[in-house]
C-alpha cells in the first residue's frame, strides 16, 4: 500500500445521534474508534503510509504509531474500503 | 428492551416504472386509488430531515423507478443537506448523462442498477421491456462519473444458470458491489412463484460459482448472495427485525416496517403528511405491533435455539401468507408446525410463463 485512499463512495462521518465515528459505505456503515477515524481522515490518496504515521505521531507526541496505522489500513483494505491511489 | 434507532429509510418515490418485472416487490394494487397521490417535494425533504434526527444514516431512493420523479435532483441535494448517505436504486433506463451529472453535483453517493439477466434478449424478456443496452450504458456512465456502483440481479430459475456471466459482467463494468438477490416471495413474485422458484441443483451450482468468483477476485467486488428463504430451515431476521432498523415510506406517504407490510390486514399505517416520523417510529400501530418479542407465539416464545433476538420470528408477511396468521412463527422455521407448506412450495409444479407487473392486478394468483 503506497498511498492509501478511501474507496469510491466511502465517506467519513461523525454521527451526532449515536455519538460515534462512522465510515459510510453503499447501504452500510462501519463503526470506527477514534484512532481508526483519524487514520482514515489522512488516507487522502496523497500521503504515503509513512506520512500518515508522521502526522499522527506529531499530533500525539508519540514515537511510533506505525503498527496502529498499518492495522487500520490493512483491515479496511481487506474489506475493499481502502485502496491504493498509486495502483 | 431498549428501543433501537432506525439506520435506513427506504423512500419509494413512485410506483410508476417502465419495466414489468414479474418478481417486483411492489404491492399488487400499485395502480389503485391509494397510491395515486404521491408525496410533494417538501414532504420528502421534511421526512429526510426528521429521519436523520431519528438516527437514519442510509437513504435508499427507490420505487418503482425513482428517476420518473421530476424533483429527484432536488431530493438528492436535500438528502446531502440532511446528512444522509444516498443510494439511487434504478433500472437505469432513464440515467442519461445530463441527469446523472446533475445528480452527482447534488451529492448522490451511490447508484445501484438492476439487470434482469446478463444476456440482452433474456434481460428484455424478463423485464418485459427493451432495456438491456440502456442499463449497460447507465452502469458505464455511473462509473465514469465516479459514483459508487452496485449491480443488482434478482435471481430465479430462469436466470440462475447464467450466474457466472452475471459475475463477470459486474467485474467488467467495474461494480464495487454485486447484489445477487434470490427472489423473495411477496408482491408480484407470489403471482409468479411457480415460474420463479429455482431447483436445489441450480442453487448449489450458483453458490459454487459465487465462491469461485470470490476466491478469484477478492474484495474488489463485494458479492452479496442471499439464499432464498424457501431453502432454509431457520428464518431470516426479516428487515433486521420488525421496527428495528428500517422504515419504508410508500409513494403516498404511508410508513411501513417492510415493503410488504401492507398485505397484513388490520395494520394501521401512519402517514408522513399527518405525523412526525419520530412518533411513527416509536408509537404507530404498524411499528409497535410486532416489535421486540412480546407478541410471539409458540414455538417462538420458548424457542429451543434461543433465537428470538436473532431472527425476531422471521417474516410476518410470509407467516400470514402460508399460515393465515401474521403473528405465527415464520413457517420457514423447522419448528413451525406449518413447515411442510414451505417444503411443498419448494416442490410445487413449475412453469415458465410469467404474469408481468403492470398497473393492473394480476389475473392468476
Image (tube, rainbow, N blue to C red):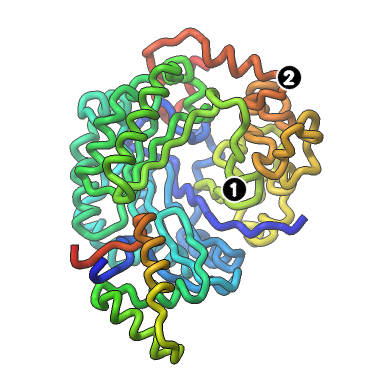
Q: Nearer the viewer, residue A34 or A68?
A: A68
Asked if badges 1 and 2 are on one and the same chain, I answer yes
| Residue depicted at 25% across the width and 57% down the height | B99
- Would you place residue B273 above or below residue B27 in this image? below
Q: Nearer the viewer, residue B97 or B239?
A: B239
Q: Nearer the viewer, residue B266 or B32?
A: B266
Image quadrant holding the N terminus of chain B, namely: bottom right
| Residue depicted at 43% across the width and 52% down the height | B61
Residue B355, visible in the rendered structure = yes
In the image as oriented, which residue stretches furthest toward the top?
B349
Instruction: Determine whether the residue tagged by mark 2 lies in a helix, strand or loop.
Output: loop
Q: Chain of mark 2?
A: B
Residue B28, visible in the rendered structure = no
Residue at the spot of label 1: B254
Residue at the spot of label 2: B337
| Residue depicted at 61% across the width and 38% down the height | B261
Q: Chain of mark 1?
A: B
- From the top left corner, tell me how far across and down residue B180 is, in percent: 39, 36
Determine which quarter of the picture holds residue A40.
bottom left
- From the top left corner, tell me how far across and down residue B160 is, in percent: 35, 24
Determine which quarter of the picture holds residue B7.
bottom right
- From the top left corner, tell me how far across and down residue B352 is, in percent: 37, 13
Q: Which class describes the residues within 10 Å of circle 2: few (<14), some (14-19), or many (20+)?
A: some
- From the top left corner, tell me how far across and down residue B155 is, in percent: 39, 29
- Label located before the other in sequence (1 or 2): 1
Instruction: Determine whether the residue tagged by mark 1 lies in a helix, strand or loop.
Output: loop
The Cα atoms of the two marked residues, 1 and 2, are separated by 34 Å
Q: Which class describes the residues within 10 Å of circle 1: few (<14), some (14-19), or many (20+)?
A: many
- Would you place residue B175 above or below residue B261 in this image? below
Q: Of the residues tagged 1 and 2, which is closer to the observer? A: 2
Amino acid at each position: 500500500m503506497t498511498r492509501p485512499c478511501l474507496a469510491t463512495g466511502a465517506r467519513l462521518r461523525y454521527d451526532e445521534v449515536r455519538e460515534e465515528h462512522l465510515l459510510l459505505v453503499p447501504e452500510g456503515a462501519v463503526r470506527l474508534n477514534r484512532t481508526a477515524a483519524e487514520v482514515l481522515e489522512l488516507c487522502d490518496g496523497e500521503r504515503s503510509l509513512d506520512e500518515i504515521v508522521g502526522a499522527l505521531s506529531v499530533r500525539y507526541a508519540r514515537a511510533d504509531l506505525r503498527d496502529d496505522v498499518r492495522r487500520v489500513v490493512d483491515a479496511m483494505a481487506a474489506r475493499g474500503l481502502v485502496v491504493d491511489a498509486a495502483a | 428492551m431498549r428501543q433501537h434507532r432506525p439506520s435506513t429509510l427506504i423512500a419509494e418515490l413512485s410506483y410508476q416504472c417502465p419495466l414489468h418485472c414479474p418478481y417486483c416487490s411492489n404491492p399488487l394494487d400499485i395502480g389503485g386509488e391509494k397510491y395515486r397521490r404521491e408525496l410533494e417535494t417538501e414532504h420528502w425533504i421534511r421526512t429526510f430531515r426528521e429521519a436523520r434526527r431519528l438516527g437514519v444514516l442510509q437513504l435508499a431512493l427507490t420505487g418503482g423507478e425513482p428517476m420518473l420523479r421530476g424533483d429527484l435532483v432536488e431530493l438528492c441535494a436535500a438528502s446531502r443537506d440532511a446528512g444522509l448517505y444516498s443510494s439511487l436504486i434504478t433500472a437505469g433506463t432513464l440515467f442519461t448523462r445530463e441527469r446523472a451529472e446533475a445528480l452527482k453535483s447534488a451529492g448522490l453517493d451511490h447508484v445501484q442498477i438492476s439487470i434482469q439477466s446478463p444476456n440482452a434478449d433474456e434481460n428484455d424478456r424478463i423485464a418485459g421491456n427493451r432495456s438491456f443496452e440502456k442499463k449497460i450504458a447507465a452502469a458505464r456512465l455511473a462509473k465514469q462519473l465516479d459514483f459508487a456502483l452496485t449491480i443488482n440481479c434478482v435471481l430465479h430459475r430462469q436466470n440462475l444458470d447464467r450466474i457466472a456471466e452475471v459475475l463477470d459482467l459486474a467485474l467488467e463494468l467495474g461494480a464495487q458491489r454485486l447484489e445477487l438477490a434470490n427472489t423473495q416471495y411477496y408482491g408480484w413474485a407470489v403471482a409468479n412463484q411457480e415460474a420463479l422458484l429455482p431447483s436445489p441443483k441450480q442453487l448449489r451450482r450458483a453458490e459454487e460459482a459465487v465462491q469461485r468468483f470470490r476466491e478469484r477476485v477478492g474484495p474488489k467486488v463485494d458479492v452479496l448472495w442471499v439464499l432464498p428463504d424457501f431453502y432454509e430451515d431457520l428464518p431470516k431476521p426479516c428487515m433486521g427485525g420488525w421496527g428495528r432498523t428500517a422504515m419504508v415510506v410508500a409513494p403516498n406517504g404511508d410508513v411501513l416496517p417492510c415493503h410488504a407490510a401492507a398485505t397484513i390486514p388490520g395494520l394501521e399505517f401512519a402517514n408522513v403528511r399527518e405525523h412526525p416520523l419520530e412518533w411513527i417510529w416509536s408509537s404507530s400501530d404498524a411499528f409497535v405491533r410486532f416489535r421486540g418479542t412480546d407478541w410471539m407465539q409458540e414455538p417462538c416464545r420458548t424457542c429451543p435455539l434461543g433465537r428470538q433476538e436473532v431472527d425476531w420470528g422471521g417474516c410476518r408477511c410470509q407467516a400470514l401468507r402460508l399460515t393465515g396468521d401474521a403473528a405465527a412463527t415464520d413457517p420457514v422455521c423447522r419448528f413451525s408446525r406449518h413447515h411442510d407448506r414451505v417444503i411443498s412450495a419448494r416442490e410445487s409444479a413449475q412453469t415458465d410463463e410469467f404474469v408481468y407487473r403492470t398497473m393492473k392486478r394480476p389475473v392468476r394468483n
